[in-house]
Image (spheres, helix red, strand yellow):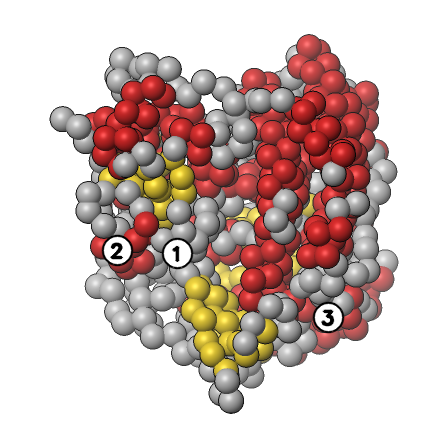
Amino acid sequence: MTLEKFNLQFARVRGAARVFRADVNAIEWITACRQVNERGGRLVALWGSERAPGFAVHAALADADGLLVLILPVPQDRPSYPGIEGIFPVAGRMQRAAYDMLGIEAQGDDDRRPWLRHAAWPSDKFPLRDDFDRACIYEPGTDDYPFVSVAGDGVHEIPVGPVHAGTIEPGHFRFSIIGERVLRLEERLGYKHKGIEKRFAGMSLDEGARLAARVSGDSTVAYGWAYAMAAESACGAMPPPRAAWLRALLLERERIANHLGDLGFIGNDAGLAFGLAQFSLLKEDMLRLNAELFGHRYLMDAIVPGGVARDIAQSGMERVRVEADQLTETVALLKNIYDEHPGLQDRFIACGRVTPELAARLGLVGLAGRASAQALDLREQFPVEPYDQLDVQMATHRNGDVAARVTVRFEEVFESLRLIRQILELIPLGQTRAALPATAAGAFALGIIEGWRGEVLVALETGANGAIARCHAHDPSWQNWPVIEHAVIDNIVPDFPLINKSFNLSYSGQDL
Amino acid sequence: MYNILKQIVTTGIKTEPPPVADEALRATGERLRADILEYFGGALTIRHVDAGSCNGCELEINALNNPYYNLEGLGIKFVASPRHADMLLVTGPVSRNMEVALQRTYDATPEPKLVVALGDCGCTGGIFGESYASRGRVSNVIPVDVAVPGCPPTPFAIMQGILTAISAKKT
């Protein structure tokens, strides 16, 4: 096993995902990060936790062998650790968030501005510390975030948000422009921070499932599955096979529904209202069938630790099959219209381009990554049941523009429809939910799944009583938000909504 | 162009009737039209504010404009600025980082104005509750006329909530 290259003691974390963990010291921490980077691996997530009397910082790294979790103790009297932003640029915001939440500082990295903390709590209080007073509501402080300013002849700033002009989530975008051209975009997020991670602490594993399903509503199945995988790993349980297959059915339905919605909105943002009308009809039909078959339009709480909440009858499977056939036909027709629409293609092509080199350097993931030649899809690379029996075909493109992100969505819709047909054919009979054994105290567990936007990770630590001591949920938007700042450079301001929509990132999932 | 026209004709008109008279809500599409005419000169304008939701409610607000619900067909329209709005449609528990923005949006909306709080979080704080980071229900921050529960509420329920707000203001 090539893991030996690291010269570290890795232990396999039990569970469906291929995860290894190692306790490291500061030198091993940096060395292992460098090695993973040199081998073409990347940083998936970075988070902190309290380990009385001190703290710990965790880095989840994706390597050819699986997911490696490095755990570095951080002393109480001098709570700092070597920063890894120089190795993985994507670490920057995660390190700033870890400081806001726990007061552990990344040495050597320059940007010390708060990220999730605005003015709701003072800079010397850290919500995820055990001694943080949950009942205390602090007086709002002043919020004067120092944006980077661009000077020069004819440079203007456009501040946008947090309340945006459309029905979208809040965040702030600071554009520096000359004429219509964007010189620089700086994002400021964290507006939706509502204390999810603190909320998890003390919940039972079952209670936590409902909260996990609401980290980012559009990815509720992905979060539900990643959380269930972690909870099952913590208890040493596996879902019954039929439940695993049903989870994949739900996940692919979530992927299709979101892609259909995005394809409509992207068409609309480029001036083709017809596209929005058509795709939103298709999406609505899917949501209505979801409600009938699974009890919820967006499939919230359909996945539970131990399995799924509801089985599907033979008649329901038949309806899903008919729907898949109809969708395949209609989406092909609409794809043809998009492809041959000169006005649409004129807006799509070369707009908001992220080159494969930039994508690799910045760690772009998910569907946006695949549109920039990043061949990453957990369903193909580290398939959990049932993906190990489904032969997922990854969609990748090299152009990295809006057109490529549209094409990847189309291809993924067709692939998911194919997978759904396969699932309906191959799904085994049997139980759909297993009772979970008592949770082990002091367990460390992890779940990760390829959601429609990218990989969703949930890490769990249980306390002495088996309740949740720490639960960290990681959205792929952490990786992809910083890339939008690059994608818009030299584009015109009116193309920003189109570029932004072509990524369609989560604010809630990143703000936590 | 031929394919687009052909698809439009093939699709036909999908719009469904608006929510039927509900005893509790006492509002129908027909009465709604009268109400809007009476109070808002033939067009109700809504500014949506996400004050900290999980984005589930936003999915359903967007669905209101699909051809099935066709909210705009009733003369109800989403606008880009609170200064153009008659109604604020607010989702989420109000995160403390959004509290000032929500308050300012409310202040920027001209009188007479209505507020509809959406979703379990908007109604009660929901699963996120009140904490160092969340003010909980929308009415903890700005006055609320109608609160529509649900996680997320269906487009149909949201429509009913909007209609209820308009008729409730009458008495």
Q: Residues within 10 Å of mark 2 (few under 14, many from 20)?
A: some
Mark 3 residue element: helix
Residue at point 73%, 28% (across, down): B6
**Residue B108 screen position, x and y as percent:** 26, 55
Q: Is residue B136 rendered to the left or right of residue A11?
A: left
Q: Earlier in the sequence, mark 1 or mark 3?
A: 1
Question: Which subunit holds the residue at mark 3?
Answer: A
* Residue bearing the label numbered 1: A163
In this rendering, the label closer to the viewer, 1 or 3: 1
The Cα atoms of the two marked residues, 1 and 3, are separated by 30 Å
**Residue A100 screen position, x and y as percent:** 42, 67
Mark 2 residue element: helix
Q: Is residue B87 rendered to the left or right of residue A314?
A: left
**Residue A51 screen position, x and y as percent:** 47, 62
Q: Nearer the viewer, residue A507 or B17?
A: B17
Q: Give the amino acid at mark 2.
A: Ala
Above or below, B119 relative to A8: above
Residue at point 54%, 76% (across, down): A179
Q: Give the amino acid at mark 1.
A: Val
* Residue bearing the label numbered 3: A358
In this rendering, the label closer to the viewer, 2 or 1: 2
- Report which quarter residue A329 is drawn in: top right
Q: Is residue B59 visible?
A: yes
The Cα atoms of the two marked residues, 2 and 1, are separated by 12 Å
Q: Nearer the viewer, residue A341 or B135?
A: A341
The mark found on residue B108 in the picture is 2
Above or below, B149 relative to A408: above
